[in-house]
Image (spheres, rainbow, N blue to C red):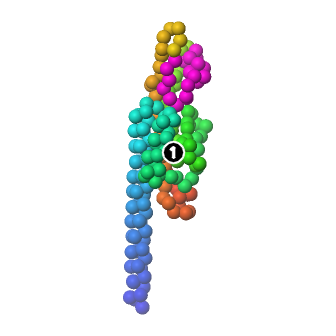
Amino acid sequence: MKESISYSFLLNIIILFITVCAAIIMGIFSYYKAFRANSIITETIEKYEGYNCIAKEEIARKLGGIGYNTPFNVKCKNSDGNCETDNAENGNYKVISYNLDFDANPNDEYVKNNLKDYFAYGEKNNSTYKCNEKGCTTNKHYQYGVYTYMYVELPVVSNLIRLSFF
């Protein structure tokens, strides 16, 4: 009788050890996939000098190549500011852009006078040129934040655990 109790105890320890090791390995692979997706998105944004339609197409093609497809909906919150998700049926990532030229002090006279003209012209997540009688100006000072998500492709676990990678 003593041997059966110690064998079941030993078996429980082995099962626990294998489960913990499997969870750690799944977490490493999930982190690696999210990091790769984040690198692809940021490199493409830098390559095309903004988050425009050409960059979106290349990002979708490259993310499909590595098999990055989140099993949950990625949505922008109201607190995110200038946020956009990808064009997939359920967003796989979100990009937040910070316009460093116009996200200055809102009481600044330059910002008050030019902010309305800026949002009426061009894409809001991209650098634009605007020409008038005084000459051409640009707002090329953008900073992008990219959120990708770590997930494990298991039926119950994928809906419970959503870890973002910024």
Residue 133 in percent (x, y) is at: 53, 8
Query: Residue drawn 54% across and 42% down?
Result: 86
In the depicted view, which residue is nearer to us: 100 or 127? 127
SS state under label 1: loop
Q: Is residue 166 visible?
A: no
In the depicted view, which residue is nearer to us: 7 or 47? 47
Outermost residue, bottom side: 1
- Asked if residue 42 is positioned above or below residue 29 in the image, the reply reads above
Residue 84 in percent (x, y) is at: 55, 38
- Asked if residue 143 is positioned above or below residue 61 in the image, the reply reads above
> Tag 1: residue type?
Tyr
In the picture of the structure, the residue carrying the numbered disc 1 is 93
- Asked if residue 67 is positioned above or below residue 39 in the image, the reply reads below
Residue 131 in percent (x, y) is at: 51, 14
* Quadrant location, the N terminus: bottom left
* Quadrant location, the C terminus: top left
Query: Residue drawn 43% across and 52% down?
Result: 66
Residue 59 in percent (x, y) is at: 46, 42
Quarter where residue 155 is shown: bottom right
Q: Residues within 10 Å of mark 1 (few under 14, many from 20)?
A: many
Bounds of the magenta segment:
111-130
Whether the magenta-drawn stretch holds residue 112 is answered as yes
Number of marks in picture:
1
14 horizontally vs 112: left or right: left
Q: Is residue 117 visible?
A: yes
- Asked if residue 100 is positioned above or below residue 33 in the image, the reply reads above
Query: Residue drawn 55% across and 28% down?
Result: 123
Query: Residue drawn 39% across and 83% down?
Result: 7
